[in-house]
């Protein structure tokens, strides 16, 4: 009986070995091809993080008078959200180079216009951005005017015309932008009662004792905000019976 059981076990093992050989020949594996459930999942796609760029801002335009040709340049409006800027380099276009956020520079006392460049760099002196502005060295504008109304028409109650078209910006770099008029000027007390962008204006005297002499004064302002000296003329306002004009 024992010998019979051993023979039966032998044949079962032999059958199992043959079956395993068949599976190996057909599939290359003695075990079923199961999906590995422990394999790591694919990494998620990278998310683009928006970056705010560095933007250099040189400010301006700038201007100064030749009588005091010192200009303060301001780079504080430069955009630097991640604080990567280490140096601010200024090129004043006259051979001078300076570093700093806010800097002062003195130009030669001659009329000129300069293209000023601000360059911002990181800790490795790599340029991040740059910006160009202008700086002008100016002369004061020059005020001049005439009474355009005929002498016989300069009477109380009538419009008197004044023309300051002969005024100049003083250096040819810009233009006269504003005319400030004082129709009752007193020495060292310029109090403009009218401001115009047009060089021609009018005024009517309607009160006071006439005939009487008045002093008219004008100051002009250029497109950089620089003011001229005052130009004056003395005008005699007559009553309705006649008129004379005196210009000094």
Image (cartoon, rainbow, N blue to C red):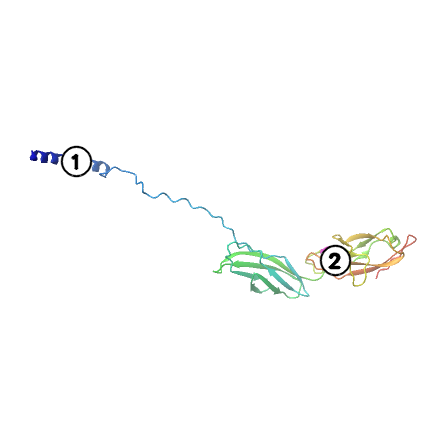
Residue 243 is left or right of residue 32, and the answer is: right
Q: Position of residue 7 (x, y in %)?
A: 9, 35
Q: Position of residue 89 (x, y in %)?
A: 55, 61
The residue indicated by pointer 1 is 16
The residue indicated by pointer 2 is 220
Q: Count the marks: how many?
A: 2
Q: Residue furthest right?
A: 241
Most prominent secondary structure in the magenta stretch? strand
Q: Quadrant of residue 66?
A: bottom right
| Point 81% across, 52% down: residue | 202
Q: Residues within 10 Å of mark 1 (few under 14, many from 20)?
A: few
| SS at circle 2 | strand
Separation of disc 1 and disc 2 at Cα?
114 Å
Residue 228 is left or right of residue 214, and the answer is: left
202 in magenta: no
Q: Are marks 1 and 2 in contact (CB under 8 Å)?
A: no
| SS at circle 1 | helix
Residue 239 is left or right of residue 162, and the answer is: right
Residue 156 is left or right of residue 34, and the answer is: right
> Which range of residues does the magenta coloring cover?
176-180
Q: Which mark is residue 54?
A: none
Frontmost residue, 207 versus 22: 207
């Amino acid at each position: 009986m024992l010998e019979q059981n051993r023979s039966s076990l032998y044949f079962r093992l032999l059958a199992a070995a043959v079956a395993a050989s068949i599976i190996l020949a057909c599939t290359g594996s003695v075990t079923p091809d199961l999906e590995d459930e422990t394999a790591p999942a694919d990494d998620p796609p990278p998310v683009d993080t928006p970056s705010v760029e560095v933007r250099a801002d040189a400010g301006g335009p700038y201007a100064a008078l030749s009588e005091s040709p010192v200009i303060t340049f301001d780079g504080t409006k430069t955009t630097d959200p991640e604080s990567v800027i280490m140096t601010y380099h200024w090129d004043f276009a006259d051979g001078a180079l300076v570093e700093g956020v806010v800097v002062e520079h003195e130009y030669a006392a001659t009329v000129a216009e300069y293209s000023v460049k601000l360059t911002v760099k990181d800790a490795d002196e790599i340029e991040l951005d740059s910006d160009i502005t202008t700086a002008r060295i100016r002369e004061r504008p020059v005020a001049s005017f005439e009474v355009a109304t005929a002498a016989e028409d300069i009477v109380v109650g009538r419009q008197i015309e004044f023309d300051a078209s002969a005024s100049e910006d003083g250096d040819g770099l810009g233009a006269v932008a504003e005319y400030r008029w004082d129709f009752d000027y007193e020495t060292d007390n310029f109090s403009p009662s009218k401001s115009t962008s047009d060089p021609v204006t009018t005024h009517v005297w309607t009160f006071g004792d006439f005939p009487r002499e008045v002093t008219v004064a004008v100051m002009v302002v250029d497109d950089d905000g620089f003011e001229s000296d005052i130009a004056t003329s003395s005008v005699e306002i007559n009553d309705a019976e006649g008129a004379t004009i005196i210009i000094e």
